[in-house]
Amino acid sequence: MTEEGRIVLSVLGALTFCAILAFFAIYFVRIKRPTHFGYETVTESEKRERVAGVFTSVAESYDRMNDLMSFGWHRVWKDHFVASLNPGFSPLTAGPDPRGPQHILDIAGGTGDIAFRMLHTAHVLNANPAVRVTISDINRAMLTVGKQRSTTLPASQQAALSFVEANAENLSQTRPLHPYPSPLEPTSTDAHGRQEQAFFDPATATSSIPSNSVDLYTVAFGIRNFSNIPAALREAHRVLKPGGVFACLEFSKADRFPLFNAVYKEWSFRAIPLIGQLVAADRDSYQYLVESIERFPSQRDFRDMIVDAGFVVAGEGYEDLTGGVAAIHKGMKPRA
Amino acid sequence: MHPPTVSCSAGAAATRRLLLRPLRPAILPSSRLTPAPPSRSLSSTTCRPITSSPSPFNNKNNNRPTSLHRPQQKQQQQQQQPLRTYHSHTHPAPPGPFTPAEAHLLSAAYLHVPAHGFTPEALALGARDIGLLDISPAVLPDGGAFALIRWHLYFQRTCLAGKVHDIFAGEGEGGAPRTVGERVEALAWARLRGNEGVVGRWQEALAIMAQPSYVPASLKELAQLADEILYLAGDVSVDPSWYTKRASLSTIYAAAELFQTTDTSPGFRETRAFLRRRLDEAARAGGAVRAVGEWVGFNASAAVNVLRSKGVRI
């Protein structure tokens, strides 16, 4: 290792140490672990409140984790992502768009980070209240978090939102979200009495997303976790209208800048699992997070996967953010 | 950008492939492009460099698909091949920086630029014209405004080759350009005429091009334009003047373009006069530098010879 690299690493080490101290402080003072009310007997309304509380804390820790891991920069990425798509924009013409209102499908958008920004851009900045957004996620817990957060939005924006549970690899089987707790599907608990994450079971599907029905398909920091990415891309191609846009914000490779990349790798493999352990009490999940980032294909390879799914791209087909730590990939479904 | 060569940098296989093909009339690009009538109005059909190349030569040799309506599997191969940075007499021009879908969308949006400027409006209206959605321009990098400007630059630059035939048509009869310098002026003027349709919007475009993230791409386009003009004018210098000529032409062209944005004289007469004055100045300055260099060189060698004649061992 070069001298330069060693200096950078030692500085990073010192920073990490300070961070650890700070997190210990946060850990003991502020973090409230989910209460074990699984064994308690509570009324249904009480339970609903408590469950809601759990999801609020999940959402809080989710946001706090993202802020800590990316130094708050994920907000800038998401803002840029939505601004570059400019949803709801419509040229000034007499009368409404004859092709009907825009429909945006936000896949893996459980907590609503992207969807709420989309709604803001479309309804407020572009003054186009006809735009509606469907948030889809395989994880009912995350969707419930998003649903809860959406209550702070203006009523017109809430009305334009819908939540569905779906597996992105097969959008022909979906189900409108029924938030926890559900009388039909009692929540399961693990050995500690905590609620397990409930993933969408296609057998319970009641509806579907039709082909050629979506203007804009977005997936932010989600596609990495799909078990079959080509299938998800084909499904995106199916549901998009001709001329519709597929847009993906995802972690990527910063190989172009070796020194920066070395620092970034140190941060992600040493600091992030530690932060996860301290803040979210879940080291394994965050270990998985950094490993999945490492395993995700490079910008060009992923662009080629998008093209293979039948999309056309413009220019290079991707845009690097922060030197390639994250990247935006876009593709358009051509006219048949 | 490197000094021009006509040698083949492609692999031997490519050379063999080319040799198997019947010989074409070799040199001037005017012979390999269908002459297009000089377009005064803004049009995406009179000179279309990407989507419908009229020359079978261009179509055969690259894999560029001509239709937007089918996904193209070859696309990524094209994008990965390195772009040649010099003009070749023996190879077709490398593909432009736009994918077919992008070119189709941008050429449709380009028609709306005079009315709406280099804006999302023009892009959305262009997308509607070719049966796409309002959201479709989102696929372009950074929302597409700069892509639209770049399209204008690229389109007008590649149009020059098609206009060469008309510009040089009356050559030798009087009034028509003869020397390289005159041809450069004629070509630079033809390129400035290409701005006519959008000149009311060109200040906006210059402002966008001056944004830090777009400066490198804009400067590259300018350099390519200077290179194209000098190449078409028949400049064959292979000494350091290759660089100085391109640098000075770039400066003069950029200045003339800025002048043009505020020029209200009929037919942009003032801009033409401005361009001519600047080119004359450059020629005079170049001549002065050359003369001084010659004088210094002559006297230096004379001084050395005097010293040698006095027995100094130099």
Image (cartoon, coloured by chain):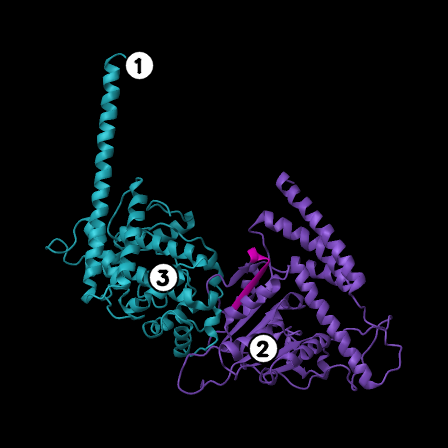
Chain colours: A purple, B cyan
Question: Residue visible at 38% across and 59% down?
Answer: B61
Marking on residue B313: 1
Which one is in front, A266 or A253?
A266
Question: At label 1, which amino acid type do we have?
Answer: Arg
Q: Main secondary structure of the magenta part?
A: strand
Question: What segment is highlighted magenta in the picture?
Answer: A322-331
Residue labelled with disc 3: B206
Q: Position of residue A160 (x, y in %)?
A: 58, 83
Between the C-alphas of marks 2 and 1, the distance is 85 Å
* A272 shown above or below B124: above
Q: Residue furthest top?
A: B311
Which one is in front, A170 or B204?
B204
Badge 2 and badge 1 both on one subunit: no
The subunit carrying tag 2 is A
Residue labelled with disc 2: A105
Question: At label 2, which amino acid type do we have?
Answer: Leu
Q: Mark 1 falls on what kind of element?
A: loop
Which one is in front, B139 or A155?
A155
